[in-house]
């Protein structure tokens, strides 16, 4: 401030000095002009002063702005702004450094790409809650930086709406890696200490300072009773002074001792334990603590009983296993020959258990299996057997039924109905309610020449009949099943010849877009049998899956589709079409599936970007990580992916956000309900919003009416497939459709 005042005084002094020097030489007649000149000079000086003040003000503003930019860019917290589509629109230098990328490269990038796969669902759920509802939310996620390293981060999210603009989400980003690492180390240390082995910690003088819960369980002494004592509390008297002298000598020399020792529990019982003692040293080499770990190695009749239990009983449910069941079945078959009674086995398979297990976790699945086992055991008589064969399969052996086969069948059905009713009751597992049903097959035996293996096979076949009948039902094995098996075998034999005799065809169903017209087609498999006629896909595709023929058939479909794409390249009206191909689970999970697709594309010369592979949700759930690996290998060369029948399974963000998808296909069952069921319409709207949020295209299948199409258009879905436009047709008819529907 003093410098500025000095400059102003200097300018005034110079002006006054100049006026004094000029005064004596001016004539008196020019006095008015002199005064005018004086005023002009004073005015000029004042303007210079004002300009100087303005320059100082501008400099101060620039300095203030620079300080703000520095505070924003170099703050210890990362700041970024996301658009409604979750794209980065602004980020400070600290945030860019935390993401490991240059700031200019981050603009318009999807922030979700930096969120580790295991936290994708949490992030998307948090973002949608903030973006759609305006809730201020915080969450902790793992971020994968540009160089592949990971950091733990805390995200505080705030929704803002600028005047006249779209809402944005502001995020404050903090690196909490150090805290997470400290917490993890503490957690690991706590878990390690509370292991199944007994642990005891003493000071350098052998005074106990800490024990774990396993110590209390193995010795009978509580922590309060042990603290302040020495390990002599457990002494059995079986080791002499020389033994302990050797132990301490080893600890002094090697800081470590291990061996067998006999100790005494609080109740007086002597037991053998395997003990390991480690000396804990300070940086200066002095011993600060001794840590001992031990386990009971006493050999007794309980150990022998455990060996028997492991050999003949299921470790999860404690029910007899397959080995013990077969033994009891053999005895039951022999008994019916002697006493003339009937017997029956009920083969139970839990409906949709695999889906529950995969989506809710194996811990919930195991709890459900244990509860099912308990209910089954409560349904049978004391002399009957309930066994678990493995997975979600159970068998009930009923003995001493009525000697009349019809009466015995009635008794078996009554028992089966009782079982199904018990299984169908709700389950409360970890404070959540679950529902479960079973498909049951029943096979009777009565003084007939049948083996244990055949009896189990018959019941298994009956169970599959129950599955085919819609699940949650009972079916008996009878000769009609054998007839069905023979018909199935004949169909299988014909199917094996279908490829060789060129009976398979690809039909094409157009995929339409509101403004562009035909954008592609879905290739659908058909079997034109010379005697059976056109065999429905539902009659032969499941058979192809079961027999493994789907592998060669699926490869043929890929070859035919790619050859057609190549043929379309020569026509300007078809070269931009995309062709969708369905892939079976068995085909997709081949180790070399990606290599097969690449080879077919290379041999045909087709453009990979014109090929789209449709996957079902059940296929993805079989092995999500394996699915992602295969998809990424094909995405790298341009192949697209669509999630078929979306919404019919457990449509969870936990896998949806991890998969490199291009498109969601809304299942036709939801489209069919538009206009009739508000819930179906709401599901369609949700899927469209979800797809847009995740940056995916959305197409609806099964569109049959103008009302359905109009609803989809109004809600942002502009791609369609269904009878409203065309049924699946042979190639020639499809190309005629193309010619008549050019935009």
Image (tube, grey):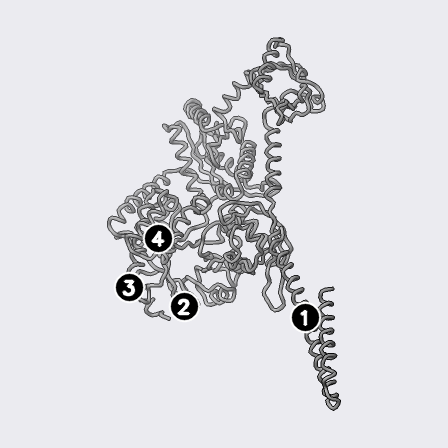
Residue sitting at x 40%, y 67%: 517
Q: Position of residue 67 (x, y in %)?
A: 64, 58
- Dot 3: few (<14), some (14–19), or many (≥20) neighbours within 10 Å? few
Q: Mark 2 — residue?
A: 516
Q: Find the residue positioned furthest to the left.
A: 501
Q: Earlier in the sequence, mark 3 or mark 4?
A: 4
* Real-space Cα separation, disc 2 to disc 3, in angstroms: 20 Å
Q: Position of residue 54 (x, y in %)?
A: 67, 70
Secondary structure at numbered mark 1:
helix
Q: Position of residue 387 (x, y in %)?
A: 49, 30
Q: Earlier in the sequence, mark 2 or mark 4?
A: 2
- Dot 4: few (<14), some (14–19), or many (≥20) neighbours within 10 Å? few
Q: Mark 1 — residue?
A: 52
* Real-space Cα separation, disc 3 to disc 4, in angstroms: 33 Å
The quadrant holding residue 367 is: top right
Secondary structure at numbered mark 4:
loop
Give the answer, above or below, for where 172 lies relative to 736. above
């Amino acid at each position: 401030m003093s410098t500025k005042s000095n400059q102003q005084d200097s300018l005034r002094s110079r002006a006054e000095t100049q006026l004094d020097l000029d005064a004596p030489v001016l004539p008196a007649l020019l006095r008015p002009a002199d005064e005018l000149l004086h005023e002009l000079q004073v005015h000029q000086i004042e303007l210079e002063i004002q300009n100087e003040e303005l320059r100082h003000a501008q400099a101060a503003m620039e300095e203030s702005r620079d300080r703000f930019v520095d505070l924003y860019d170099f703050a210890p917290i990362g700041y970024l702004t996301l658009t409604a589509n979750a794209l980065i629109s602004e980020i400070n230098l600290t945030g860019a450094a935390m993401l490991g990328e240059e700031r200019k490269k981050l603009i318009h990038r999807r922030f979700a790409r930096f969120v580790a796969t295991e936290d994708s669902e949490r992030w998307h759920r948090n973002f949608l809650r903030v973006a759609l509802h305006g809730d201020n939310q915080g969450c902790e996620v793992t971020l994968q930086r540009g160089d592949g390293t990971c950091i733990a981060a805390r995200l505080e999210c705030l929704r803002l709406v600028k005047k006249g603009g779209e809402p944005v989400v502001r995020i404050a980003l903090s690196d909490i890696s150090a805290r997470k690492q400290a917490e993890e180390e503490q957690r690991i240390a706590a878990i390690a200490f509370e292991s199944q082995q007994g642990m005891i910690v003493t000071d350098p003088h052998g005074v106990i300072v800490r024990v774990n819960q396993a110590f209390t369980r193995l010795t009978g002494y509580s922590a309060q009773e042990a603290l302040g004592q020495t390990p002599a509390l457990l002494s059995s008297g079986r080791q002499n002074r020389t033994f302990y002298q050797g132990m301490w000598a080893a600890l002094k020399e090697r800081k470590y001792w291990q061996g067998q020792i006999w100790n005494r529990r609080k109740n007086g019982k002597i037991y053998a334990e395997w003990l390991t003692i480690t000396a804990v040293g300070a940086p200066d080499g002095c011993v600060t603590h001794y840590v001992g770990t031990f386990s009971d190695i006493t050999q007794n009749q309980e150990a022998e009983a455990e060996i028997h239990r492991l050999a003949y009983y299921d470790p999860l449910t404690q029910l007899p296993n397959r080995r013990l069941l077969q033994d009891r079945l053999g005895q039951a078959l022999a008994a019916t020959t002697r006493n003339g009674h009937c017997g029956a086995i009920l083969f139970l398979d839990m409906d949709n258990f695999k889906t529950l297990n995969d989506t809710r976790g194996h811990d919930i699945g195991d709890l459900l299996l244990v509860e099912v086992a308990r209910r089954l055991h409560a349904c049978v008589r004391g002399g009957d057997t309930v066994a678990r064969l493995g997975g979600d399969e159970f068998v009930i052996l009923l003995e001493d039924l009525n000697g009349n086969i019809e009466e015995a069948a009635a008794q078996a059905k009554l028992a089966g109905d009782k079982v199904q009713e018990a299984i169908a009751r709700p389950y409360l597992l970890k404070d959540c309610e679950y529902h479960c049903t079973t498909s049951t097959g029943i096979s009777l035996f009565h003084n007939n020449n049948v083996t244990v293996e055949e009896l189990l096979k018959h019941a298994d076949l009956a169970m599959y009949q129950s599955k085919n009948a819609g699940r949650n039902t009972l079916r008996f094995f009878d000769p009609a099943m054998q007839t069905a098996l023979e018909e199935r075998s004949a169909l299988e034999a014909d199917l094996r010849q279908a490829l060789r005799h060129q009976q398979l065809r690809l039909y094409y169903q157009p995929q339409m877009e509101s403004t562009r017209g035909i954008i592609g087609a879905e290739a659908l498999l058909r079997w034109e049998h010379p005697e059976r006629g056109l065999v429905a896909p539902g009659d032969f595709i499941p058979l192809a899956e079961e027999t493994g023929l789907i592998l060669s058939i699926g490869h043929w479909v890929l070859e035919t589709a790619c050859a057609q794409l190549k043929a379309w390249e020569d026509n300007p009206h078809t070269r931009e079409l995309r062709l969708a191909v369905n892939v079976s689970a068995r085909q997709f999970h081949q180790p070399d599936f990606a290599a097969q697709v690449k080879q077919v594309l290379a041999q045909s010369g087709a453009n990979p970007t014109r090929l789209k592979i449709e996957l079902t949700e059940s296929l993805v759930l079989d092995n999500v990580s394996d699915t992602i690996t295969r998809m990424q290998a094909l995405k790298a060369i341009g192949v697209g992916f669509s999630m078929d029948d979306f919404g019919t399974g457990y449509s969870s963000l936990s896998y949806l956000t991890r998969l490199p998808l291009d498109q969601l296909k809304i299942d036709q069952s939801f489209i069919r309900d538009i206009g009739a069921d508000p819930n179906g319409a709401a599901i369609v709207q949700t899927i469209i919003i979800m797809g847009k949020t995740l940056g995916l295209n959305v197409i609806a299948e099964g569109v049959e009416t103008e009302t359905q199409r109009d609803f989809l258009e109004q809600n942002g879905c502009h791609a369609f497939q269904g009878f409203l436009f065309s049924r699946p047709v042979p190639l020639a008819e499809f190309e005629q459709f193309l010619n008549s529907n050019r935009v």
